Amino acid sequence: MKVGQNTEKESLRPFYPYNTEEIERLIKTRRSVRLFKKDDVPDELVERLIDLAHWAPSGMNAQPWKFVVIKNRGLLEEIRRATVKGLELTMKVFTKRQPHWRLMKLLVRLLKPSMYRIMDPRAMQGSRALLEVPKTDVLLKAPVLILALGNNGSSTALEDCSAATQNLALAAHAHGLGSCWVGFVEKFLPMNRRLCKRLGIGGEWFLATVTALGYPTMDYGRKLIERDPAEIVWIR
Ligand SMILES: Cc1cc2nc3c(=O)[nH]c(=O)nc-3n(C[C@H](O)[C@H](O)[C@H](O)COP(=O)(O)O)c2cc1C
């Protein structure tokens, strides 16, 4: 038999047996949920969502991910504080009032591209807004936080973890749960080495994505967040 030859005639069926409309609706009605009930999410359900997450594609099917599920309130509070501290520090350093702002931007761009992306004006504006409203909880008071750790040995780990994270969001939505991708944590938590060590971040593993998960307090119904028209370049 040739490599890649499909032995199962069944899987070659030319039609798509799922409810396309339902799937399209699921994709479009997923929303970033920022208000959660305090209720716990059963471990078995979290495991099921992570199982669905890890059916995502990955480069060479390497599956270079690992998931850390945090439900411990004390630890969640530590993560929240460390994130805000990292954010405050970064905002102090990355301010246009710095005398060598342009030079610094260039150096950061060359030496630490991940930090350079934080200097994106939209992200800076969001960060400032978060710090200005002291009651805002960067973790959105979610009862569960799921970290996707990417393996440093894989060249596609960040993309793979991101694909898994979107699967997780859709799976959560399908099960009546709400989720929100929390970029702030993934950017600023790594500044706290002690906490990272405790969470298994460092060495072989880097923090790729962070998802807040829980039961939503409100029904978002059919209200969609509009998207700009997708820019498509056709080359025929
Ligand atoms: C990489 C990434 C990071 C994000 N970080 C945050 C965050 O830290 N806090 C937050 O409230 N939302 C965060 N979001 C959610 C976006 O704000 C949200 O996806 C966007 O506004 C569109 O809304 P929708 O997800 O409801 O369609 C993030 C989304 C992505 C993809």
Image (cartoon, rainbow, N blue to C red):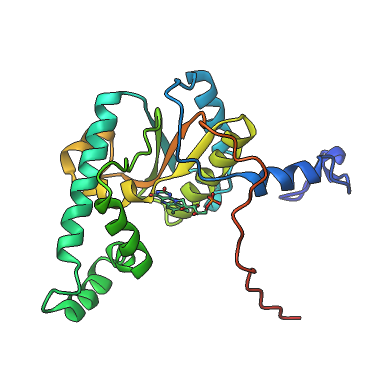
Quarter-of-image position of residue 97 = bottom left
Residue shown at 13% from the left, 79% from the top: 100
Q: Is residue 197 visible?
A: yes
Residue shown at 31% from the left, 43% from the top: 136
Q: Is residue 196 visible?
A: no
137 sits left or right of 220 in the view: left
Q: Quadrant of the C terminus?
A: bottom right
Quarter-of-image position of residue 212 = top left
Front-most of 179 and 189?
179
In the rendered image, residue 111, in percent from the top left (x then y), is placed at 23, 69
In the rendered image, residue 217, in percent from the top left (x then y), is placed at 51, 31
Residue shown at 50% from the left, 43% from the top: 63
- Relative to 192, does residue 121 appear above or below in the rendering? below
15 sits left or right of 36 in the view: right
Front-most of 195 and 101?
101
What is the tally of numbered marks visible in this picture? 0
- Relative to 176, does residue 60 appear above or below in the rendering? below
- Relative to 101, does residue 147 appear above or below in the rendering? above
In the rendered image, residue 194, in percent from the top left (x then y), is placed at 16, 38
In the rendered image, residue 38, in percent from the top left (x then y), is placed at 42, 23
194 sits left or right of 142 in the view: left
Quarter-of-image position of residue 231 = bottom right
